[in-house]
Image: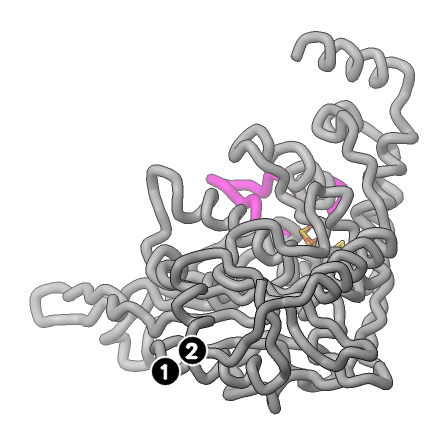
Amino acid sequence: MRTMGLAGLDELVAALGRAGYEVYGPRARDGAIVLAPIAGVADLPHGVGDTQDAAFYRLRDRGDAKVFGYSTAVQGLKPVLFPAHELLWKARKTPIGFDVEDADATPPKPRAFLGARDCDLRALAVHDTVLASREFADKAYGQRREGVFVVAVTCSDPCGTCFCVSQGGSPKPQEGYDLALTELLDGDGHRFLVEVGSERGAEILAEVTTTDAPPTDTAAADAVVAEATASMGRTLDTSDLHDVMYAAADSPHWDEVAARCLACTNCTLVCPTCFCTSVEDTTDLTKSMTERHRVWDSCFGSRFSYIHGGVVRESGKSRYRQWITHKLAGYQDQFGLSGCVGCGRCITWCPAAIDITAEAAALRAGLTTGATDALETAGETR
Ligand code: SF4
Ligand code: SF4
């Protein structure tokens, strides 16, 4: 364990730049914390906190000098590693047909992420499984993902919509990082406890001015984690959740949610694990060049489930049921993990204040006797 000050953090960003990384970190921009390229500590959100609740997000002045004193950035690492819009190929008309050119296959500059939370890292692990570890891997994602350097940071100020602890996470980064920091600000000064998670992390840290961490700093960091763990804004009862979701397939509660849902797709856009896409073709005005683009799509869109002559999920009720059931049950069947890391973003950014934790609780509470029997049978069968 090492300790460094704010100047050391600046040296760390510089060392990552010298090593060839494009460094992304939290920035306060347009009234929100966003992940964007940074040149140094000066770009971080000094003294900025956030207040989040269902359909509510505001930045606030913390009244101190913390640079990681907010809960989560508006989006995780997804928009950088799995962009919302991507050219797949171009076709150019020729006298006898057309030539197809693949999108530029030059590997992108490696990225370093400063400030990733544990929920961001677990969401990254979901994308690694879904996009890069199956038979038909996403080559472009794999290229961007390769060589990513992560400086994770303990979440000291979870917001009102956070429930990562219910989902097996923690305010303290667990794995998948090269370096992990815990920001400390007390009578002993403003500093960062540093833990090394990889060889690359140790190599980069060797270029930074650090000192041995005193036991008081490790104790202070443990206290930050304990306090954050105890102040999660929400909880989700995950016992038998997979079976609860399937048993609730015919619940009347779906109609109640559908009456509020605007099908705006916000929840899927901010969700760090959502990965659905569609393709769009564009042709230039001379009709000599066509491009195919991959774009993020959402299961809340009316055309998302269109297959061979019809839309499978026409109602808002069926679309919300698809989304939450896939997150909390279907992912386990498909990928062996939960599709929700408890980051709370879908709750904050839903304009109708639809809350995945509250809806799951209502579905559980509304199970009929018959459904409860089925649930017990499913449990016995497993
Ligand atoms: S479903 Fe909601 S809480 Fe869960 S990972 Fe997605 S955005 Fe976060
Ligand atoms: S649940 Fe909320 S965020 Fe998601 S589509 Fe419906 S209204 Fe939009």
Which residue lies under the disc numbered 2? 207
Boundaries of the magenta span: 302-317
- Determine the secondary structure under disc 2: loop
For the residues carrying marks 1 and 2, which lies nearer the camera in this image? 2
Kind of residue at disc 1: Arg
Whether residue 103 is visible, yes or no, is yes
Q: Mark number for residue 332? A: none
Quarter of the image containing the N terminus? Answer: bottom right
**Residue 48: x and y, percent?**
77, 82
- Determine the secondary structure under disc 1: helix
Residue 243 sits above or below residue 327 on the image: above
Q: Earlier in the sequence, mark 1 or mark 2?
A: 1
Quarter of the image containing the C terminus? Answer: top right
Which residue lies under the disc numbered 1? 18
- Residues tagged 1 and 2 counted as in contact (Cβ below 8 A): yes
Nearer the observer, 159 or 265:
159
All told, the count of numbered labels is 2
On the picture, is 89 further left or further right than 254?
left
On the picture, is 237 further left or further right than 43?
right
Q: How is the image coloured?
A: one colour
Q: Residue at x 81, y 47 (%)?
A: 258
Q: Residue at x 75, y 81 (%)?
A: 189
Kind of residue at disc 2: Glu
Could you say which quadrant of the image residue 133 lies in?
top left
> What secondary structure characterizes most of the magenta part?
loop
